[in-house]
Amino acid sequence: MMNDKKIRVLVAKAGLDGHDRGAKVIAQALRDAGMEVIYTGLRQTPEQIVETAIQEDVQVVGISSLSGAHMHLFPPVVQLLREQGAADVLVIGGGVIPMEDIPYLKEAGIAEIFTPGASTEDIVKYIRERV
Amino acid sequence: MFDSELLKTLQEKKQAWDKKVESRLDKVPELKKVFKTDSNIEIKRLYTPVEISGLSYEKDLGLPGEYPYTRGVQPTMYRGRLWTMRQYAGFGSAEETNKRFKYLLEQGQTGLSIAFDLPTQIGYDSDHPLARGEVGKVGVAIDSLLDMETLFDGIPLDKVSTSMTINSPAAVILAMYIAMAEKQGVPVKELNGTIQNDILKEYVARGTYIFPPQPSMRLITDIFAYCAKEVPNWNTISISGYHIREAGSTAVQEIAFTLADGIAYVEAAIRAGLNVDEFAPRLSFFFNAHLNFFEEVAKFRAARRIWARIMKERFGAKDPRSQMLRFHTQTAGCTLTAQQPDVNIVRVAFQALSAVLGGTQSLHTNSRDEALALPSEHSVLIALRTQQVIGYEVGVTETVDPLGGSYFIESLTDSIEKEVMAYINKIDEMGGAVAAIEKGFMQREIQQSAYTYQRQVESGERTVIGVNRFITDTEMPKDLLRVNPAVADRQVEKLRKLQENRDQRQVAEVLQRLRMVAQTDENIMPSIIEAVKAYATLGEICGILREVFGEYQQQVML
């Protein structure tokens, strides 16, 4: 972990889903934990998320979807980051995500999936350990 | 409500009693220093007539079916008829949802409630690039009247009441329902149902907005005016606190922001030239039933009383139906846990009971597996059976407002009313709900409450069984519902065929007329009905309106 620089995180709402309670609570918790947090707002395509991630030079992207579209929306974010030479960005995801989907998402390069009930402390710890 | 001599003696006795209890607290302490409701209202050790000595039975409670409706909107309540058991359902294609509807009706459900997928809710056809991955996911995909015809195949519209969770494109979906009724030969005047049609809470909490506030309010008041004449039994709006609560608000904020939104709609309709008693009887509400049992019961009672007062005193409504707050309730989705999901059945039962004791007109009970996926058929059945147990087995329906008169409930009802009014006054000072939303006031208040809630869960101050206490490893249910991924392809194909086979010239004409009407202040409903009958798609109609009205840009705030 870099001590001289704050960890920069992009919290993104992917797709058309409007449930942003979790995304905003996590954004606020990461900020309270001393990270610099950029929140995209609603209705972001994978392309927009990656563009913002690169522009803002973040180390972590947290994507949220509660509408069941995660299988279509999460993997392209990792894919596009790799294509644009930003493969080192840590991508994590959250939302209403069935257990059976998690292996596929991890294989696609999403480092971790946090499901309902996950604590913000665990997420903070997870990010600190890996960045 | 009580004799003043008696109150005086009681007050003295209670003070002595409190002193005695407190003197022993070091030996037998209470579990918390301060007890509070979810809205941060302090709960006393004991409630007696002293705590509600300021209440007037006649002025503040009244009789059921009479102003201010604290005790209920109907004189006989559930002795006459139970609430409508209405499970929100919809997924995949219109064919699949049609099957689920028929199943629910066979199981004794008494009304339908349609969940639409996100592209439909945001006015995109299934082939739009932004619909990728979302078609048929959180609800059924509706691109045109053709899909609505499939959805209601074999369901006569004069035999059901249908609630539709649709907001920005509400006028289009309502137009399809009207067109379908005509095809079924059902007189439009006999249609029963509700469209959510509540745009303000979309900006605040739910996120399926399309247009900016001003044209959105115009669409809403056009619907009010059209239905008042043509579809008189239709609930033209369901002013919703449900999603505000789900986004993290307290019970007080839920009621305050919902009623503030309600005030904004009434004012908009009056500005549009409508008479309050013309449209207000068809306004309905939608609330959340959360965990803090007594506060929830009191919340529903307080909401009725406040709305009645606002309608009568502020807007001069004379028709009693304009003063009655009728509401649908859904149990709190955000309280469901992915851990030990069967425990959710118990949470839902208590939440549902609070809605019934609060006098709800209709109810949706959530399914145990909703923190994991869309509910399976089996889980939905348990949820419906939970309502039936409350309605038919436990006897809570046999007298009106059974908790009315409880010192605690009446005191809470009163406290909630006071705190809600403080918020409403503050919002009035900001220039009303639309201004408060544009300033981000409601959003910030909700966000703060959501964060506090999460902190309380993580610090253990708030117990969530299976999450921060009584944790066990449980096996996850195996029969989770998966939406067939082929649905999206089939839906796109169906749309393509429709667009090839319809009368293109007619479609172009009706869309051109719609554009012209949208640019004036003429009522927009007739031209939308005309467009859906020509099988113009939802995306095409909303596309025209996007061009004329522009699109809302969310203010991103943290």
Image (cartoon, grey):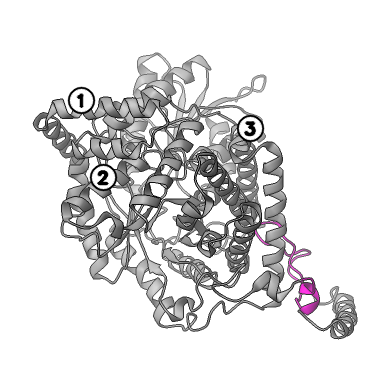
Secondary structure of the residue carrying tag 3 is loop
The picture places residue A83, in percent across and down from the top left corner, at 35, 16
Residue ID for mark 1: B508
Q: Is residue B2 left or right of residue B187?
A: right
Q: Mark 2 or mark 3, which is nearer to you?
A: 2
C-alpha distance separating marks 2 and 1:
18 Å
- The residue shown at (70%, 53%) is B421
Q: What is the chain identity of the residue bearing mark 3? A: B
Secondary structure of the residue carrying tag 2 is helix
The picture places residue B558, in percent across and down from the top left corner, at 61, 32
Q: For residue A43, what is the image quadrant?
A: top left
Q: Nearer the viewer, residue A67 or B342?
A: A67
Residue ID for mark 3: B439
Q: Name the amino acid, label 1.
A: Ala
The picture places residue B139, in percent across and down from the top left corner, at 31, 47
Relative height, residue B470 to residue B228 (above, below): below
Q: Nearer the viewer, residue A54 or B193?
A: B193
Q: Is residue B458 left or right of residue B389?
A: right
Residue ID for mark 2: B176
Q: Dividing the image into 4 quarters, which one contains the N terminus of chain B? A: bottom right
The answer to whether any part of residue B171 appears in the image is: yes
Judge whether residue B256 is colored magenta.
Answer: no
C-alpha distance separating marks 1 and 3:
40 Å
* Marks 2, 3 in one chain: yes
Q: Name the amino acid, label 3.
A: Lys
User: What stretch of residues is rendered in magenta?
Assistant: B29-54
Q: For residue B323, what is the image quadrant?
A: bottom right
Q: What is the chain identity of the residue bearing mark 2? A: B
Are there few (<14), some (14-19), or many (20+) residues within 10 Å of tag 1?
some
